Image (cartoon, helix red, strand yellow):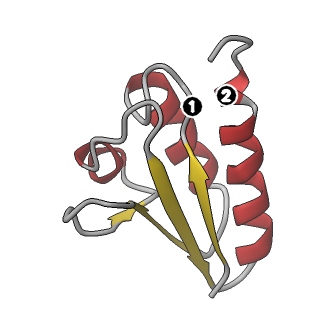
Amino acid sequence: MPSLQIIVNHSAGLHARPAAQFVKLANTFPCTITVRKLNSDIPPANAKSPLSVLTLGVNQGDQIEILTEGEQAEEALAALRQLIESNFGENHP
C-alpha cells in the first residue's frame, strides 16, 4: 500500500479551501485514499469525505500520512503530494 508522510505548511492547515481542494482531488481517483494526522489519537479519515478530513484537525505544521490502495494508487499519491507541496496553489505559506 503506497503511503506518504508530509507536513502541511498552509496557514489554514487542512481546513476550509485547502481541505476542499484535497477532497476534490482525492475524488478524481478510483482508489481508496485515507489520511491520518500523525502524533494524534484521531482515527484515519476517508480522504474523499470533506467532513472526515475536517475532523482530523490538521493545522499548519502538522504532519500527515496519506495511504492509497487500489487502481491509480501511485498517481493519486503523487497528485496529492504535489497539491500539498504547492501550498494548495498559493504563493505564501
Which residue is rendered at x = 71% and y = 82% of the image? 71
Indicate the amino acid at tag 1: Asn
The label nearer to you, 1 versus 2, is: 1
Numbered label attached to residue 87: 2
Question: In the image, is residue 58 above or below residue 15?
Answer: below
Q: Is residue 61 left or right of residue 91?
A: left
Instruction: State which quadrant residue 57 falls in.
Output: top left
Which residue is rendered at x = 71% and y = 51% of the image? 81
Indicate the amino acid at tag 2: Asn
Circle count = 2
Instruction: State which quadrant residue 14 falls in.
Output: top left
Numbered label attached to residue 26: none
Question: In the image, is residue 61 above or below residue 77?
Answer: above
Upstream in the sequence, badge 1 or badge 2? 1
Whole-percent x, y for residue 13 in the image: 44, 31
Q: Secondary structure at mark 2?
A: helix
Position of the N terminus by quadrant: bottom right
Can you identify the residue that label 1 sits on? 9
C-alpha distance separating marks 1 and 2: 7 Å
Q: Furthest-left residue in view?
A: 41
Whole-percent x, y for residue 54 in the image: 30, 42
Q: Is residue 64 left or right of residue 9?
A: left
Whole-percent x, y for residue 29 in the image: 67, 64
Residue count near mark 1 (Cα–Cα under 10 Å), binned few <14, some 14–19, many ≥20: many
Which residue is rendered at x = 29% and y = 53% of the image? 52
Q: Secondary structure at mark 1?
A: loop
Q: Is residue 73 left or right of residue 44?
A: right
Marks 1 and 2 in Cβ contact (< 8 Å):
yes
Residue count near mark 2 (Cα–Cα under 10 Å), binned few <14, some 14–19, many ≥20: some
Position of the C terminus by quadrant: top right
Whole-percent x, y for residue 21 in the image: 56, 35
Q: Nearer the viewer, residue 77 or 29?
A: 77
